[in-house]
Image (spheres, rainbow, N blue to C red):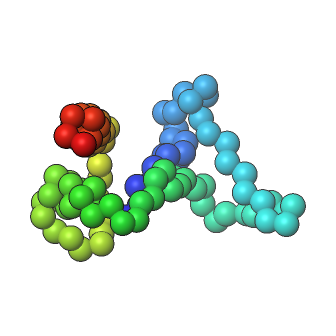
Amino acid sequence: MYLSKRLNIKNYNFTKEEDRYEFKLTKNGQEVKFLKEPEAIIFEAAYWRKANQIHNWFVENVQDGNDDCREYYVSVEQLKELLQLCKKLKFLLNYSLQNFM
């Protein structure tokens, strides 16, 4: 499962000068020309394998139970919720290992 970040870089007429993006793509040192200005850059923010519980969390909490390999929007609040859950589980696991082993 992948977590991607989309950075919108399209400059509109109303975009302030200090908020404008300049995007230049090169291949073998040569600038690649575009017919239209790029609208966004999408890059991989995270990737995990063999983490069935995390995968299931996304299916149940983001994808309305649909495990269909499609892209879904994940809010910062949802990511914070998942992080807090992972921290709680880590604490409980550490507590269990220290007190019951």
Residue that appears at 23% across and 74% down:
68
Quadrant of residue 80 within the rendered picture: top left
Residue 81 image offset from top left, x and y in percent:
23, 38
Residue that appears at 24% across and 58% down:
53
As rendered, which of 1 and 39 lies closer to the eye?
1
Residue 94 image offset from top left, x and y in percent:
29, 37
Residue that appears at 54% across and 45% down:
9
Quadrant of residue 76 within the rendered picture: top left
Query: What is the quadrant of the N terminus in the image?
Result: bottom left
Quadrant of residue 55 within the rendered picture: bottom left
Q: Is residue 59 left or right of residue 90?
A: left
Residue at far right of view? 29
Q: Is residue 88 visible?
A: no
As rendered, which of 43 and 98 lies closer to the eye?
98
As rendered, which of 49 and 14 lies closer to the eye?
49
Instruction: Name above or below for residue 65 compared with residue 100.
Output: below
Q: Is residue 31 visible?
A: yes
Instruction: Name above or below for residue 59 compared with residue 9.
Output: below
